[in-house]
Amino acid sequence: MTNQAEKCATLAALHASDEAWVIPNPWDIGSAKDLEKHGFKALATSSAACAYTLGLKDGEVSLEQKLAYCDAMARCTTVPLSVDFEDGYDNDAASVAANIQRLAATGVAGCSIEDFSRVDQKVFDFNHAVERIDAAVAAVSALDMPFQLVARADGFLRKQYDLDEAIKRLQAFSAAGAHVLYTPGLNTMEQIQQVVDNTDRPLNVLSPFFPGVSVSEFSAAGVNRLSLGDVLLTKVRTHFNESVEQMVSAGAAS
């Protein structure tokens, strides 16, 4: 099986690509194996999908639960796994760094860190957000593999700051050494172009916000990585519930 260092190198090479590529989000071991069989080169966890598998709401998963989940997910396929590590499971920068080191020990190839507190339900102020990414960069730099760090400016999605502030934060995260930048909630090609024109790192875009836009169109706009969030799980759950409702209403056993 491909070792962790090789998985990290594969993910780093994908982030260096000139072409956009899709990193889908499985929710369990079975879905991860299916996605690998379909030829995807890397996978990413979704915090909402992870929570669903544990019977919890998004944001309720504990650090220990997340680490156990990531350990199982990293072991089940030969492709790299990037983790939605939310806020790093602490507000304190040093604790975020320590938690990333624990995450890396599960065998995953990268993770994202948000500037939004799970506990306080608000964004960190600019200086503290940068301090947290500084600490995260130091943590991954200490590893003996090219573990990939995605720095997220989530305040735009949560309507706690505008796109100009998001770009300012992404620029600071880039200067700190983050490998990939991500501000969820972009929903126009003009917004994407504004971010691309003002940053210098690979950009991840949440593609379900852009129905009908092709991978080649994202590539032409300068986007590197396309994630799906929990959209695959949502489709499965929708079909499941519709099927069950039909069974119940028809009084059928299959």
Image (tube, grey):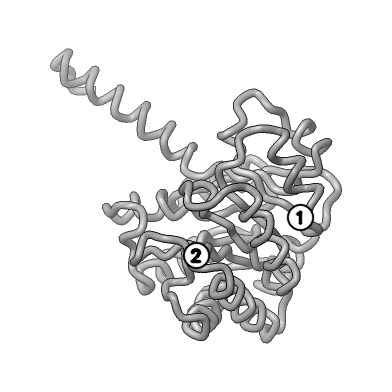
Q: Nearer the viewer, residue 224 or 67?
A: 224
Measured as percent of width and height from the top left, residue 159 is found at 48, 47
- Which amino acid lies under the numbered mark 1 shown in the image of this protein? Pro
- Which amino acid lies under the numbered mark 2 shown in the image of this protein? Phe
Q: Is residue 179 left or right of residue 227?
A: right
Label disc, if present, on residue 152 of the rendered structure: none
Residue 193, image quadrant: top right
User: Compared to 103, does 228 lie above or below?
Assistant: above
Q: Nearer the viewer, residue 71 or 224?
A: 224
Residue 133, image quadrant: bottom right
Considering only order in the chain, which callout, 1 or 2, is on the residue closer to the N terminus?
2
User: Compared to 169, does 183 lie above or below?
Assistant: above
Residue drawn at x 44%, y 55% as measured from the top left: 47
Quickly name the residue at label 2: 85
Residue at the far left in the pictured view: 251
Report how many numbered discs are placed on residues in the image. Answer: 2
**Residue 183 visible, this angle:** yes
Q: Is residue 223 left or right of residue 99?
A: right
Residue drawn at x 61%, y 51% as measured from the top left: 183
Residue drawn at x 30%, y 52% as measured from the top left: 57
**Residue 14 visible, this angle:** no
Residue at the far right in the pictured view: 18
Label disc, if present, on residue 202 of the rendered structure: 1
Measured as percent of width and height from the top left, residue 172 is found at 70, 67
Question: Which quarter of the image is occupied by the N terminus?
Answer: bottom right
How far apart are the alpha carbons under marks 2 and 1?
19 Å
Measured as percent of width and height from the top left, residue 5 is found at 70, 74
